[in-house]
Image: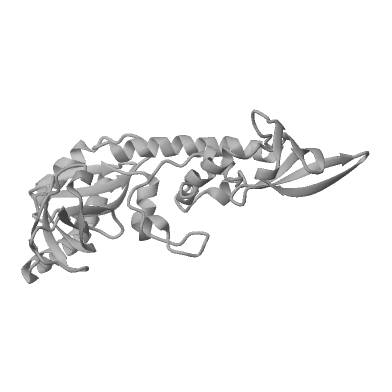
């Protein structure tokens, strides 16, 4: 068994796991750890626990030490330097008239590198900017282009639910969200209702998708012909999570509706796809554009500029 702890370097941010070995650490302790980018200071957000070594994807790096008052002071000084570097970089961006928006500056703990994060609509030639910054700060400079989701994550805010944005409170990684998820969850295909503060499809569409996919395997589609205890009818609507369907019956010129548990209904003829009303069809074009932008964002996030 291996003793591990979860460490977060910035809030909000992803949680990384390290080998706690024999060092006694508590939640909220500051620790110095070794990463692929050198030494970093982070906060323990998941206390020590044991895990079977077979479940580890790769060997974990060890904690170097619990942060000393000197380490913490050095980190605080770096945070102040970041604000100064932000102003200087913005001035240089204006000087070179670069079409980019600086969002954050990050000093590495050992001062071996300064990272400048920015958003832009396309590729930016920032070679002269990097030369200027390197001459000023006398260290390695790295510029990284991020997507609008990362930008909002760093700015913060509240969602339509009234709670703090998921990406700012607990979400470590952004997963791909698609229009297909909105359709399967029977959510209105209205961009204003299913887009987040970042202008992309809401992350919460991803949370219940596995459950919906599992249940939909057992349910007919809207428009399917089914056999019920009251005769043959057409599926008019579905309550996916409850696995209840509403069936439309024809009685001469009149129509009436009745709900049934899905298990009590036999599918006679299913349909290939559900019809989309004209208003949603128009919205679908806008949503497809959002989906394309999201894929481009994902590529930018994974690419090391």
Q: x%, y% of residue 152? A: 39, 53
Question: Is residue 256 visible in the rendered structure shown here?
Answer: yes
The residue closer to the viewer here, 282 or 181, is 181
- Which quadrant of the view contains residue 88? bottom left
Q: 267 or 202, which lies in front?
A: 267
Counting labels gives 0
Give residue 276's quadrant in the image.
top right
Residue drawn at (10%, 53%), measured in percent from left and top? Answer: 62
148 versus 299 height, above or below: below
Residue farthest to the bottom?
69
x, y percent for residue 292: 46, 34
Give the residue displayed 36% in from the left and 38% down from the top: 298
Give the side of residue 58 with respect to residue 120, left or right. left
Q: Position of residue 48 (x, y in %)?
A: 19, 62
In depth, the one of 183 and 124 nearer the eye is: 183
Q: Quadrant of the C terminus?
A: top left
Q: Which residue is located at x 66 percent, y 34 percent?
A: 274
Looking at the image, the residue that sits furthest to the right is: 252
**Relative to 297, is 205 on the left or the right?**
right
What coloring was used for the rendering?
A: one colour
Spot occupied by residue 169 in the image (x, y as percentages of width and height): 36, 61
Q: Residue at 14% of width from left, 67% of height from top?
A: 25
Does residue 201 appear in the picture of this structure?
Answer: no
Q: Of 79 and 42, which appears nearest the observer?
A: 42
């Amino acid at each position: 068994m291996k003793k591990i702890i979860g460490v977060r370097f910035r809030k909000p941010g992803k949680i990384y796991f390290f080998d706690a070995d024999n060092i006694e650490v508590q939640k909220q302790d500051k620790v110095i750890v070794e990463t692929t980018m050198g030494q970093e200071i982070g906060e323990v957000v998941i206390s020590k626990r044991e895990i079977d070594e077979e479940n580890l994807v790769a060997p974990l790096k060890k904690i170097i030490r619990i942060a000393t008052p000197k380490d913490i002071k050095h980190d605080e000084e770096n945070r102040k330097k970041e604000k100064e570097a932000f102003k200087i970089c913005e001035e240089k961006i204006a000087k070179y008239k670069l079409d980019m928006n600086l969002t954050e500056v990050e000093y590495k703990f050992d001062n071996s590198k300064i990272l400048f994060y920015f958003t832009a609509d396309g590729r930016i030639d920032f070679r002269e900017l990097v030369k200027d910054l390197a001459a000023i700060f006398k260290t390695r400079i790295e510029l990284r282009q991020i997507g609008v989701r990362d930008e909002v994550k760093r700015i913060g805010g509240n969602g339509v639910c009234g709670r703090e944005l998921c990406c700012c409170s607990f979400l470590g990684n952004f997963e791909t969200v698609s229009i297909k998820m909105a359709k399967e969850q029977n959510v209105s295909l209205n961009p204003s209702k299913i887009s987040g503060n970042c202008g992309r499809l809401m992350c919460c569409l991803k949370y219940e998708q596995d459950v919906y996919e599992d249940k939909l395997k057992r349910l007919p589609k809207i428009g399917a012909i089914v056999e019920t205890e009251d005769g043959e009818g057409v599926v008019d609507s579905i309550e996916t999570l409850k696995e209840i369907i509403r069936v439309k019956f024809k009685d001469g010129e009149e129509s009436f509706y009745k709900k049934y548990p899905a298990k009590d209904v036999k599918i006679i003829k299913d349909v290939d796809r559900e019809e989309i009303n004209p208003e949603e069809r128009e919205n679908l074009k806008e949503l497809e554009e959002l989906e394309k932008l999201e894929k481009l964002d994902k590529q930018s996030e994974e690419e090391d500029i």
